[in-house]
Amino acid sequence: MRKGSVIRKTGETEIELSLAVDGSGKAKIATGIGFLDHMLTLFTAHGLFDLTVRAQGDLAVDDHHMAEDVFICLGKALDEALGERHGLVRTAHSYVPMDEALARVAIDLGGRPYCVFAVDFATPRVGQLGTDLIFHLFESLAMHGRLNLHAHVLYGRNDHHKIEGLFKALARALDAATQIDPRRQGVPSTKGTLTA
C-alpha cells in the first residue's frame, strides 16, 4: 500500500497527517475548521483514499494558516506515497456536477508543479473557510505534491456547491491518475525521468 505521513510544527500550527493512496475512503479529520473537514472527508470518500488529519493552531487569528498548512502536508504526503511514480497512469480528469454547478479538474502527476484555478466565488466565506483560500489550497497541493492541477467551475450559483464539486472532481481525477497501469514499465515519461 502506498502511504505518506507528515508531521509539521510551526509557531502557527501543529499537524499530523497520513495518507494512503490505495485506501477505502476512511477519513479521520480534525482541523478545527468545519467546512474544511467536510471537504477533506468527501475528498477521501470520492478518491477512495484513507486520510487522517490531526491539527491544532492559531484559529483565533483566522483560518489561513491552518488550511494552508494542512494542504502543504497533504501534498507532501501524496508525493511520499507515490515514490518514484513508476507505472502510474499519470494524467486524468473528472467532471462532477453538484446541483446547479459543474466542476472540472484535470491533473498530471508528471512532477512539474503548476496550478491553474478558474473559479469565481460570490461570497467571502463558506462556513468558517474563506473562499479566497480555495485557490491557495489547490496551489499548495500542486506545489508540494509535484503535480500539474487545473481546476475550473464551468458554471454555478452556490459557492458551497462549486467548492464541493471541485473537491469531488479533484478526488476522482487523482484516484484515476494514481492507478497503476500494468502495461507500463518505469516512469510514465518518454524522457525516462520525472522532474520538477
Image (cartoon, grey):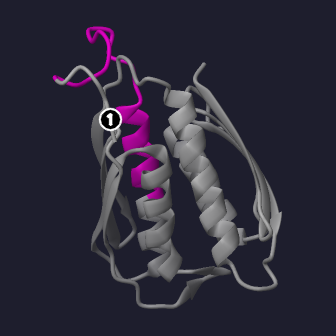
Q: Is residue 62 left or right of residue 178?
A: right
| Residue lying furthest bottom | 123
Q: Is residue 67 left or right of residue 85?
A: right
Q: Is residue 113 left or right of residue 8?
A: left
Where is residue 13 shown, x and y percent of the image?
Answer: 78, 65
Residue 169 magenta-drawn? yes
SS type, badge 1:
loop
Q: Which residues are magenta?
A: 167-190
Q: Is residue 119 above or below residue 16?
A: below
The total number of labels drawn is 1
Where is residue 90 shown, x and y percent of the image?
Answer: 31, 31
Residue 54 appears in view: yes
Q: Is residue 135 above or below residue 166?
A: below
Where is residue 105 shown, x and y percent of the image?
Answer: 32, 54
Q: Is residue 32 left or right of residue 91?
A: right
- Residue that label 1 marks: 195
Type of the residue with mark 1? Thr
| Residue lying furthest left | 190
Where is residue 168 shown, x and y percent of the image?
Answer: 46, 53
Which residue does the image show at 37% across and 45% down from the upper left? 147
